[in-house]
Image: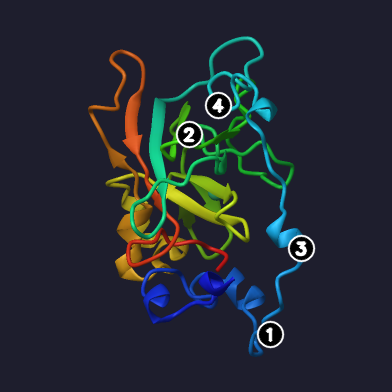
Amino acid sequence: MADLILNKTDMEVHPPRLYPDYKSTILRAPTKPLVLLKPSLSEYTGPVFGDMAMREFDNDLTMNGRKNGEPLGERIVVHGKVMDRNGNPIPHTLIEVWQANSAGRYVHKVDQHNAPLDPNFLGTGRCLTDAEGNYKFYTVKPGAYPWGNHYNAWRPNHIHFSLFGGDITSRLVTQMYFPGDPLLQHDPIYLGVPPKGRDLLIGKFDLELTEPSFALGYRFDIVLRGHSATPFENL
Ligand SMILES: [Fe+2]
């Protein structure tokens, strides 16, 4: 629990609860001092997802939503390692991802963006890190999409990540961005992260991970705590 209390170092990396340019934070940021609650039993004994709970294509978003063909878009594979502050791997961590399709549209009733749905793409997946803390997802590169934060607001390409596991007392949520995206410098969610933490949110293109004639490879390592901690949205 102590790790969930932000110290000065954390504030240099993680986004503040209130960042007025990102308008939703005005509504959800607490206006009174936080009250710390003693952790309940459920926080120590959250759901444990065994390997058997995973299905064959849970980590392959190019397969798990197929109806009559392949999803459209640039096929990518995202590798990474989940680590603690000392670089030690965190095995058996549940990672869930969700994203827009290559046209920038989510399969969700509240998403009314005038872009096509892809009948062969759901945009959700999950996997467990292995004994070395590694994970891997196949998917297509998500498209940018508009949102209502301000006039002509567009979200950069991104994949949402959620982490849950034995070393995590509360679900951790973050986003992976893509290198060189011109929208990053206009995105208040990304800019709401202190400068020191922003680069940690950008997946790195990696030719070694790229699968010839199949998928571009990106690396996105996730560090739970410490100076190199990945910025999370819900601390
Ligand atoms: Fe999104």
Q: Amino acid at mark 1?
A: Val
Secondary structure at numbered mark 3: helix
Residue 185 falls in image quadrant = bottom left
Q: Nearer the viewer, residue 207 or 3?
A: 3
Q: State which tag comes first along the sequence, 2 or 3.
A: 3
| In this picture, residue 63 sits left or right of residue 53 | left
Viewer-proximal residue among 89 and 145: 89
User: In this image, 151 relative to 132: left or right?
Assistant: right
* In the displayed structure image, the side of residue 73 where residue 195 appears, left or right: left
* Residue 10, horizontal then vertical, whole percent: 42, 73
Say above or below: 191 vs 65.
below
Residue marked by disc 4:
61
Element type at mark 2: loop
Q: Nearer the viewer, residue 14 or 146?
A: 14
Between the residue at mark 1 and the residue at mark 3, the CA separation in whole angstroms equals 18 Å
Q: Which residue is mark 2?
A: 130
Query: Closer to us: mark 1 or mark 4?
Result: 1
Q: Considering only order in the chain, which callout, 2 or 4, is on the residue closer to the N terminus?
A: 4
Look at mark 1 in the image and give the residue it sits on. Answer: 35
SS for dot 1: loop
In this view, the residue in front, 8 or 61, is 8
Query: Residue 114, relative to residue 72: is it above or below?
Result: below
Rounded to the nearest angstrom, the CA distance separating label 2 from label 1 is 36 Å
Q: Dot 3: within a 10 Å radius of its alpha carbon, few (fewer than 14), some, or many (20 or more) residues?
A: few
Three-letter amino acid code of the residue under disc 2? Asp
Mark 1 vs mark 3, foreground winner is 3
